[in-house]
Amino acid sequence: MGKKFYITTAIDYTNGAPHIGHAYEKILADTMARYMRLAGHDVYFLCGLDQHGQKVQLSAEKAGVSPEAFVRAISDQFIALWKRLDVQPDGWVETTDPRHKQVVQDMLQQLFDEGQIYRRSMRGWYSVRQEQFLSDKDREPDGSWGSQWGLVEEREEENYYFRLSDHTTWLRQHLESHPDMVFPPNRQTQLLNALREGDGVDLCISRPKSRLTWGIPLPFDDDYVTFVWFDALTNYASFAGFRDRAPESSGLPKWEDLWPCDAHIIGKDILIPAHGIYWPIMLHACGLPDDQIPKILVHGWWNMKGRKVSKSEKIEDDSGPKLIPDLVDPHAIADVVGTDGLRYFLLSDIATGGDSDISEERILVRYNKDLADILGNLLNRSLNMARKYLGSTLIAASHDSDLHHALRTTVTQLPKAARDHMKTWQIHLVLAAIIDAARQANEFIDKTAPFKLAKDPANADAVASIMRHVAESLAHFSILLSPVMPTTARRMQSQLGWTPPDGLTLDQLHWGLLPDGHQLGEPQPLFPKVLPPPAAS
Ligand code: MSP
């Protein structure tokens, strides 16, 4: 068997409930995984949670519970959300998993034994309230420390450092000889520029246990835990069977079948330095050859009024009455437009790599116009007419015209359009092409007017041919939309009375999916209209 297409996402911090930015990334990854399966690939999709760290330790203390109990409760909220949103990973990461700990410690021990990790003392400004060292970037414009830091004092601390700077020349050369390591290309350029600036700096990888206990202990010094990135980034390997000592029983995939990762899906805030510099260098330093350095896909942000959506920063929307009380909360949006309405919005209203602004108005426009008026309406009116004029049976028909030909051409070209756009993961363009084709199918009905033709039995062949064309188009749409809206696709197929063959791939789509004599099912509204709230008087 060939290598699986391995997709994974940034693991989300468990110091707060999931928000719409997390949901976007996971839905993007889930859709890419489903699309690659449809394209005939064997896919493995991994995602999960980043459970250690100072913030979690502090939040747990504040809540008066153990860090274990704190992360369990938040982790369960993520799990429930992914279930509701049809995000279906093949593997699930939780960084408190003992196998992960073992791989992290294994890598650290190797690097320590090889002299790639060393201990040194650092003097700097320390915020007692925030329990962290500060840098000049944290100063106010007048050079003072802001009140958020509380008491700031000069301190000296011993820590462990990874010799990152030994490998930056290698990384620069690697990026130059692998121009497709980071997508989109402008992010690769940005990374190369950042590498030039940050040369010569090693990475502090530890925190003394006096400051942070909620982490993975350093295998060579029990007074320290490893800090953030050595723990978090390693998940991509440790849950992919890397150095798995019990490969048969572990339930992990086989490393050889999976690695290297074909797409680490991350937001633009964690490319530099974490995924673009630390991660490839960590792998290279542990001895992985160049052809096993993974690829990174960088997406943009969902913003509100131009500012990044996050749980901590409330952005007030006072532009009138609202149906969706909190746009940051994926549940609140799904309550109004459903899981597929949310999935469709998040993937149709942003170009992969770019940013977009979320608003209730945009969500409702996408839902009511594209899904209710165009797609839902097409299915509903087609099935109603087929029932009325043909007793819901598709029969062989020969009537043809330029309009029929144009619709057939549009629909049969969709798989190629999907393949082309998905080369650069531009899902919004795939969706636009499908919705445009559905719009054309609606116009085809309006222009060929089967409701008029059906009045005269002499037009039976023409009516049958029109119904055939729209039903066939709908069968194609259901397959092509299935990576983005899996439940809608199944509902469309059930109403069409059609079960696609198991493992049907994009290549196998052809005009004639529904055979002569095919019996269509009963129409049921797919996307009931959602009316915007009346404007405040
Ligand atoms: N735990 C780290 C990642 C470790 S990966 C080894 C982290 N967590 S996070 O919860 O802050 O963010 C998780 C992912 O969500 C990141 O890829 C981040 O870019 C993405 N998003 C968070 N807010 C976002 C938006 N408003 N819009 C789109 N995605 C953004 O970073």
Image (tube, rainbow, N blue to C red):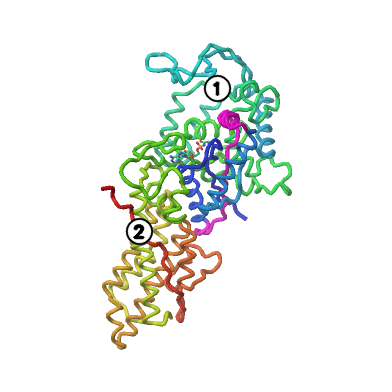
> In the rendered image of this protein, does residue 54 appear above or below residue 245?
above
Find residue 110 and report its horizontal and vertical position in percent.
Answer: 68, 29
Find residue 395 and report its horizontal and vertical position in percent.
Answer: 41, 82
The label number, if any, that marks residue 202 in the structure image = 1
**Residue at mark 1 to residue at mark 2: CA–CA distance:** 51 Å
The label number, if any, that marks residue 370 in the structure image = 2
Residues packed near mark 2 inside 10 Å, few (<14), some (14 to 19) or many (20 plus): many
Q: Residue at image x 33%, y 47%? A: 321
> In the rendered image of this protein, does residue 286 appear above or below residue 357?
above
Q: Quadrant of residue 58?
A: top right
Q: Quadrant of residue 137?
A: top left
Q: Residue at image x 48%, y 37%? A: 177
Q: Secondary structure at mark 2?
A: helix
> In the rendered image of this protein, does residue 3 appear above or below residue 266?
below
Q: Secondary structure at mark 1?
A: loop
Which of label 1 and label 2 is nearer to you? 2
Compare residues 499 and 198 and report the one nearer the observer: 499
Compare residues 185 and 524 and report the one nearer the observer: 524
For the question of whether residue 221 can be seen, the reply is: no
Q: Residue furthest front?
A: 537
In the rendered image, residue 506 lying in the magenta stretch gets the answer no
Badge 2 amino acid: Asp
Q: Are marks 1 and 2 in contact (CB under 8 Å)?
A: no
Badge 1 amino acid: Asp
Magenta span: 37-64
For the question of whether residue 465 can be seen, the reply is: yes
